[in-house]
Amino acid sequence: MKALLGLMASVLLIGSMQVSAKNYVIGVESLNYYPLYLGRGKTYTGYARELLDSFGKANGHSFTYKVLPVKRLLSEFLTGNLDFKYPANGKWAPNAKQGHKIVYSDSTIEYIDGLMTTSGNAKLTAENLTTLGTLRGFTPWVFMDDISKGSLKLFETDALESLISMTSSGRVQGAYINVVVARYYVDNQLKKPGVLTFNSGLPHARDHFLLASIKHPKIVQEFNDFLASEKDLVDKLKDKYQVRLNN
């Protein structure tokens, strides 16, 4: 009898371990936003990947990263096909998210989205800005009034490389992009530091990337606890990937 009870206890223990070791699917963007993240095919790398994997390892979770186009990512998330979405923010696409109870984490990183321009457009003002480039699927909210009125023409591209190229060649006056991502690309990929600079005098957005979930609010809370208790680790990852803001 004791042997049978011991066997049953072992089975229950193994079962509970399997539950705690469940694999979760995180939907991520099919985009070169390195060093913050790079989603391409079945590959996902960068600061976000290492941060989320570190959290999973510390809490007994494992993650599969599903790389999706930006617009489809939100749709898949809202229809319940994903356990989590990254990056996320409560201010993004509010109309699409109406009726959904989404839980957001604390900040994983602070970011600035703003206008990167060549030195020739360094003194550009909102009044003489007529052309703007951005990545397809992203909305330059701070310029939407002018775009809607037709006084500002928006050009979209699927790739960071194309956006930087059209800006540096003068096809558009500026690229509305994440400042850290743009700087890293021109410094480390193009090897042309300073070819584009952030125009802080023009409208820009400063906010945070968060992890979001509809299905797993308790794991989001676990993630918040991890961010608070492992601040030194998080800071080391920010330094490793050069994602700190210096503005």
Image: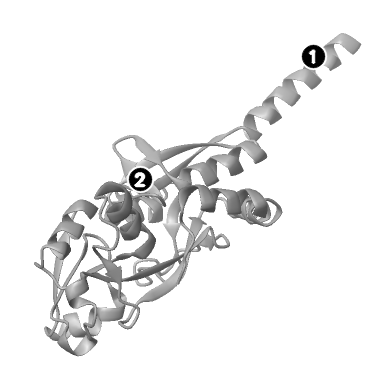
Q: What element carries label 1?
A: helix
Q: Position of residue 210 (x, y in %)?
A: 50, 60
Rendered residue at 12%/85% (across/down)? 151
Q: Which residue does the numbered mark 1 point to in the structure image? A: 7
In this rendering, the count of numbered labels is 2
Residue 50: x and y in percent read: 51, 42
Residue 85 screen position, x and y as percent:
44, 52
Q: Which amino acid does label 2 sit on?
A: Leu
- Say whether residue 129 is visible: yes
**Residue at 23% in and 62% down:** 195
Image height of 118 relative to 42, above or below: below
Q: Measuring 68% from the left and 26% from the top, which residue is drawn there?
A: 15
Disc 2, SS:
strand
Residue in the foreground of this view, choosing between 105 and 53? 53
Q: Residue 113: give x, y in percent of width and height.
A: 35, 69
| Residue 58 numbered tag | none
| Depicted 87 relative to depicted 25: above or below | below
Q: Residue at x 34, y 67 (%)?
A: 96
Task: Classify residue 221 by image quadrant.
Answer: bottom right
Of residues 83 and 139, the one drawn nearer to the viewer in this rendering: 139
Alpha carbon distance from label 2 to label 1: 46 Å
| Quadrant where the C terminus is found in the figure | bottom left
Can you tell which of label 2 and label 1 is closer to the viewer?
2
Please give left or right for residue 120 compared with residue 210 in the image.
Answer: left
Relative height, residue 83 to residue 200 (above, below): above
Nearest to the observer: residue 142 or residue 8: 142
Earlier residue among tags 2 and 1: 1
Q: On the rendered structure, is 97 left or right of 134?
A: right
Mark number for residue 38?
2
Image quarter of residue 10: top right
Amino acid at dot 1:
Leu
